[in-house]
Image (spheres, coloured by chain):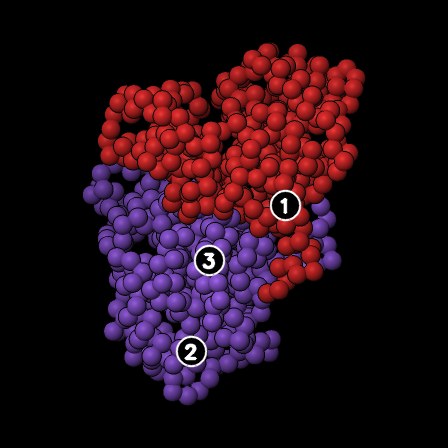
Chain colours: A red, B purple
Amino acid sequence: MHADYLWTAAPLIVSAPMAKVAMPKLAAAVSKAGGLGFIAAGYHSDHLEDLLQEAEDLLQEGTAETPIKVEEGTPKFLPVGVGFITWSASLEKALPSFSRYCPAAVWLFAPPQGFRDLIPWATRIREATACRTKIWVQVGSVSDAVEVVEAIDPDVIVVQGLDAGGHSLARGASIISLVPEIKDKLQELRPFPQKQIDVFAAGGISDSRGVAAAVALGAHGCVLGTRFLASPESLVAHGYQKALLDASDGGTSTVRTKIYDKVRDIHGWPEGYDGRGLINRTFIDHLNGLSEVKNREMYREELKRGDEGYGVNGRLTTYAGTGVGLIREVIPAGDIVKSLREGARALLYGPHNVSKL
Amino acid sequence: MHADYLWTAAPLIVSAPMAKVAMPKLAAAVSKAGGLGFIAAGYHSDHLEDLLQEAEDLLQEGTAETPIKVEEGTPKFLPVGVGFITWSASLEKALPSFSRYCPAAVWLFAPPQGFRDLIPWATRIREATACRTKIWVQVGSVSDAVEVVEAIDPDVIVVQGLDAGGHSLARGASIISLVPEIKDKLQELRPFPQKQIDVFAAGGISDSRGVAAAVALGAHGCVLGTRFLASPESLVAHGYQKALLDASDGGTSTVRTKIYDKVRDIHGWPEGYDGRGLINRTFIDHLNGLSEVKNREMYREELKRGDEGYGVNGRLTTYAGTGVGLIREVIPAGDIVKSLREGARALLYGPHNVSKL
């Protein structure tokens, strides 16, 4: 893992490619702090070239702390990743950018029919970058993991538990049982692997205790989404950030539902996916029987309120994972990376580690 | 913690008081191995005296390995716990047994209206046992935990995540975010506690990786249910155990639902509770619109098939948590306790601990 990402430190902290809000500024800040930041190409790939150029510019502004650098050449090597919602994004549009800027990783999520749909993505990206761009695939079940390994032999499997915010499988397990079961299954499928498939844990991790737990479960690193939304580098509205800070009791203040897609006119997620977000008026009215049409109208009206439209009494979608109750301040993304990494190391290996029991 | 339970070793492994199946044989085996076993008084307390006498007999058969013993006196002190489903069980019926046999712990679950309903339970059990029986309360959210602390100042809070098998809150977080958020809340509520409230983690833990993760999250110990069902000491049918061993991909092979209560004519669980079990014909037919009446009839018919009635194509209820996919053999409960404890210690503190990253 470290050999592929020389600027990083363990345990590797990753920011998720959250559609529309994880842009070059966030990704660069995370990578500069010794993590791996993902840029969301998201639902399409129209501006990928611009996004990667912006990342390059940000990464040229060096940092004294980490040996990060953009490697010149054809392609260049960018120490950030790019994420695609593959039922919707275009491989054809994305490929030319891979040939010019070779991102450190590509994260493939939610193929329309099954993981064999990712074969062209993996094949052509590997061709375009001579395998330097590592293939990360997000899964939510053991059978997903088996399918992915058989279809494309990925470099990394991101195991997303049902605590996660935003889109993921509607039914599933948390990382507590999902990470160990997938690790065992990989061992069974590939008893003598030529190359290791690294497993990253995602879903419900918001602080260093979650990172330490993921490492204890056998993960090689952690992916966080919600925690990075509460950084100045993410592109979410101030109202969104305020709603995150105000939320507590993440298991009861959030809910998995499809209604937040419906009011925003987002259609096309494959069968079995929904999204976890803070409970707000959209959801409550939906529960109480308000029609989808009327709910959508009210959503559009609410958009005019801007920052005021977020929160428990607002209607604007605020995707968040169950770890939202652990987030108490907006802090720079680089500081998040460092405090998570150092906190987890202290818990696991420090002089006052968990052996205080 | 250890001062209250002198025969135990850290991290403390606990078997859950699973109604109808966690009886003295299982509880005694767990305690004898240096854990803490709970007997399920369950939905009522009619045979509590007999159950505690049976536990005493089993515990008199000593073991060379652990310093466990029944302390004589009035009351006697029994190194096992007892669990009650408090919306249904009778405190009045239970109290005389507490005055004769003082169990090490009482586990209170699911009060009918709110945690203030537990005030008489806590007060009168403490009176009956001069506070030697420690009060454990199971919660599924941060607000539950706050209510419990304010109502009865318990000795232990069992934090149950939504991976858990059997009954628990229908919506919630896994222990990944729930344990840290509750730990922080306790610190906030009681900055200078006279006495520590210990936090135990439950839900999705099936092996030593899960135990190590729970410790990293800040739990003082772990509670396992499903894992102990696959022991010869649990009272589940062979068909049930076979279904557990056959199951994999615990997040997709189990589901949270109320239908398993309905077909068994169990009514009265407080608002907001359901149960997680293996998906079988009862659930699939329910999904496909089979009426509750007909589904119940078919359940009753299925009972005649005995062991054959369990499994994916059967109809008999098989409660299980998402960790079910990690369970591959039926082994003695004492061996489960020892391997979980030793495995977790090796992961956290051993020479080849998780620092191999």
Q: Chain of mark 3?
A: B
Residue B188's tag is 3
Q: Residue at x 57, y 64 (%)?
A: B11
Q: Chain of mark 1?
A: A
Looking at this view, is A5 or A306 the one in front? A306
Do discs 2 and 3 belong to a common subunit? yes
Residue under label 1: A339
Q: Is residue A12 visible?
A: yes
Q: Is residue B241 visible?
A: no
Determine whether B211 is above or below A334 in the image.
below
Determine whether B243 is above or below A195 in the image.
below
Determine whether A47 is above or below B63 in the image.
above
**Where, quadrant-wise, is the C terminus of chain A in this rendering?**
bottom right
Q: Position of residue B69 (x, y in %)?
A: 50, 81
**Element assignment for label 3:** helix
The number of numbered badges drawn on the structure is 3
Q: CA distance from mark 2 to mark 1?
A: 41 Å
Looking at this view, is A141 or B150 the one in front? B150
Badge 1 density bin: few <14, some 14–19, many ≥20, Cα 10 Å: some
Q: Residue at x 40, y 77 (%)?
A: B131
Q: Residue at x 33, y 79 (%)?
A: B127
Q: Residue at x 72, y 41 (%)?
A: A9
